[in-house]
Image: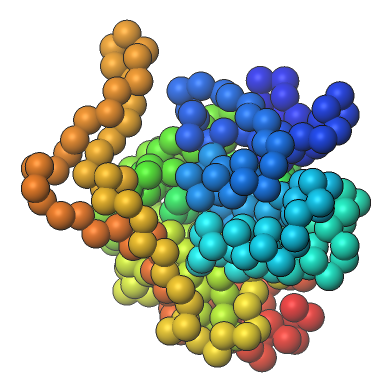
Amino acid sequence: MSAFGHPSRTVWVPADTPDTVRIIDQRQLPWRFVVEDLRSVEDVATAIREMHVRGAGCIGATAAYGMWLAATAGLDLASAAARLKATRPTAANLAWAVDRMRREGATLAAAETIAEEDAAACLAIGRHGFALLEARRQALGRPDQAPLNILTHCNAGWLAFVAHGSATAPVYAAHDAGRPVHVWVDETRPRNQGARLTAWELARHGVPHTVIADNAGGHLMQRGLVDLVITGADRVTRNGDAANKIGTYLKALAARDNHVPFHIAFPSSTLDWTLADGAGIPIEERAEDEVSQLEGPDDNGTLRTIRVSPPGSRCANPSFDVTPARLITSFITEKGVCEASEAGMRQAGL
């Protein structure tokens, strides 16, 4: 992937500034494309906590580079690790990357390896997911010239990883192979990552798509307008329960009621073998103003923030929900497509 001639990665160390970690500031998209430099572990912690970067793989890789910055500054790695882990509690990739960096010495080479592995895993997810899309097309008897309609939730594209993405990787693979696809893009309140990020990505890549209100997905499934659902995940437990952006569980319920296949795509770094099931997943509760306020440009292109709920009304903002394994048709991983169960994941070699 590429954007406005910039590197195709979401996080990288520039050759001309080797003591700096460079990221795409995702808060600015789609209105502005802004590259931000991070020069300390505190910069990295702020970027993760305040969602300059977001998405399981991107968070993990950015945290790995943060551990390298801590090491080069001579800081205590245990303290740096605790600081980074505290920023976003739900995504498994964050703690996984931080712990791995501590084991491997927190070098730049170790961080680069984590980033490279993330990109390679997502590329493999695209290949395996493309085969799944082709099988679904055949099962439906869909003519080659007719698009396969895929619904996704939140952003699990290349912005959420180092490159390629998880849920969108099969879509990009199909599109690049000349196979017609169309994506229903959930807006994904409260931060609108679907409307702002997934739609921007798909448009840049030339993939046909339509942004919909979060609550429209069930209606589209009832009308036969969704052929399958693919989402990402921030943490998957041993039994196959999966945490993802709030609202994913409702899509899984609607998919089950309408006999629509529901798939979750993720690299093995998202898998948490230490948790037996989804009941143990920590669910991040974010600030009320993410719910009560919306941001966007006015007619003059000036960014404005408006309030959408009455002053004095409290807002709850759980950022994730958990989809039980029983509602998941299959997982799409770098090792292949497998059953959403411990046995299925172990058989796949995860």
Residue extending farthest right? 109
**Residue 73 position (above or below residue 135):** above
Residue 161, horizontal then vertical, whole percent: 66, 49
* Identity of the residue drawn at 51% across and 21% down: 32
Q: Tell me which colouring the rendered structure shows.
A: rainbow
Examine the image and state in which quarter residue 276 appears.
Answer: bottom right
User: 109 or 80, which is in the foreground?
Assistant: 80
Q: Is residue 88 left or right of residue 312?
A: right
User: 320 or 77, which is in the foreground?
Assistant: 77
Residue 18, horizontal then vertical, whole percent: 86, 33
* Identity of the residue drawn at 49% across and 29% down: 28
* Identity of the residue drawn at 75% across and 62% down: 77
Numbered circles on residues, count: 0
Q: Quarter of the image containing the N terminus? A: top right
Q: Is residue 311 left or right of residue 198?
A: left
**Residue 337 position (above or below residue 47):** below
Is residue 314 in view? Answer: yes
Is residue 221 in view? Answer: no
Examine the image and state in which quarter residue 12 appears.
Answer: top right
Q: Is residue 76 left or right of residue 55?
A: right
* Identity of the residue drawn at 80% across and 66% down: 102
Q: Is residue 2 left or right of residue 146?
A: right
Residue extending farthest top? 300
Residue 174, horizontal then vertical, whole percent: 67, 47
